[in-house]
Image (cartoon, rainbow, N blue to C red):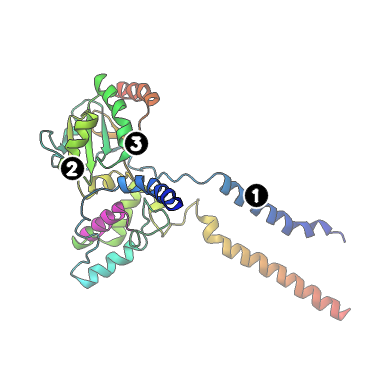
Amino acid sequence: MRNRWILFVPLAIMALLFGAFVYRLVTPPETLIQSQWINKPMPLFDLPPATAGVEGLKSSQLADGRPRLVNVFASWCIPCRAEAAQLEALKQAGVPIDGIAIRDRPEDVAAFLNEFGNPFDRIGSDQQSSVQIALGSSGVPETFLVDGKGVIREQIQGVILADDVPRIMAKLEAMK
Amino acid sequence: MKARIFLAAMLTLTALPLGAQDRLPPAPYAYQQLNDPAKEARAKALMETLRCLVCQGQSIADSDAPLAGDMRHEVRTKIAAGESPEAIRNWLVARYGNWVSYDPPFDGATALLWLGPLMFLGVGGWLAFGRFRRGDGEEEA
């Protein structure tokens, strides 16, 4: 009799569990896996040119004192097309941009640049995603903000939107 | 007519995934085993406990996503070069976090997961013990 409230403990536990299940159903967990390779130097790599007429990319070239963007993209990646205008705007504003083309063929990269423009100083071809994996990147497009010493300061997953451009420029400016 | 609408709908649904595939053949060691059976066994065991970043919930050994194939190539290449499976796991965890491993370490985030069963066993034992003792008492009374 004195401990009648204890009868409600199982019910309370079930209600809590139920609440937890409903919460996860309504707010699915974040499925983007963020790179842990932040505030660390660029992994060492030496990628061949992704297409004729554009230089390849070496990690040693990313520490020339100028903060920059390293854009991980692919010609077969549809969202990457939507990002072209923002990359062009950043380039026009004087931001150096290098590219890493994932699992791509030279002729496809050429066609992509031809159609959507070429904001890249250099494009390395990463045919087996090895640099992408070394960066902790899990998809395309992704963009890394790299400071003048070649240290990665931020990872942007997904398409850079027009609204993101001023913030990116300010952050790169602050790294100078 | 209905069939045609259905076909159109199906094509619309599949257009994007088809367009988002690369045209490169898989990496050499994505679908090819290592020549040394002992090394291949080590690579296989490791790949089964690494999580695919694309088909989340599948191991890279099970997934046919291109990135999973490239990760298998990476793992097999490193094993062939003599790296230990744990070193490779740590290398990936440093990049993708514990998320990438199906063998989570014991830390603050997983303590409840590891200790939970012991806790429940303890509580269950305590309840059962109390119940049996009361049972004995009632019989005596």
Question: At 27% from the left edge and 39% from the top edge, which residue is drawn?
Answer: A73
Give the residue furthest to the left.
A53
Residue designated by label 2: A125
Residue A83 appearing in the image: yes
SS under mark 3: strand
Name the chief secondary structure element in magenta.
helix
Q: Are marks 1 and 3 in contact (CB under 8 Å)?
A: no
Asked if residue B140 is positioned above or below residue A169 in the image, the reply reads below
Q: Residues within 10 Å of mark 1 (few under 14, many from 20)?
A: few
Task: Look at the image and give the residue range highlighted in magenta.
Answer: B64-77
Q: Residue furthest top?
A: A93
Q: Residues within 10 Å of mark 2 (few under 14, many from 20)?
A: many
Q: Is residue A59 visible?
A: no
Q: Amino acid at mark 1?
A: Gly
Residue bearing mark 3: A155
- Lower position in the chain sequence, tag 1 or tag 2: 1
Residue designated by label 1: A19
Instruction: Write down the chain letter for disc 1.
Output: A
Please state the horizontal and vertical placement of residue A85, each as a whole percent of the image: 30, 26
Residue type at mark 2 is Ser
Q: Residue at x 13, y 39 (%)?
A: A49
Q: CA distance from mark 1 to mark 2?
A: 48 Å
- Where is residue A60 drawn, in percent x and y? 16, 36
Q: Is residue A152 left or right of residue A14?
A: left
Same chain for mark 1 and mark 3? The answer is yes
Cα distance between the residues tagged 1 and 3 = 34 Å
Q: Position of residue B10 (x, y in %)?
A: 41, 50
Place residue B82 in its image quadrant: bottom left
Q: Which amino acid type is marked by label 3? A: Gln
Q: Nearer the viewer, residue A59 or A82?
A: A82
Dot placed on the residue nearer the N-terminal end, 1 or 3 = 1
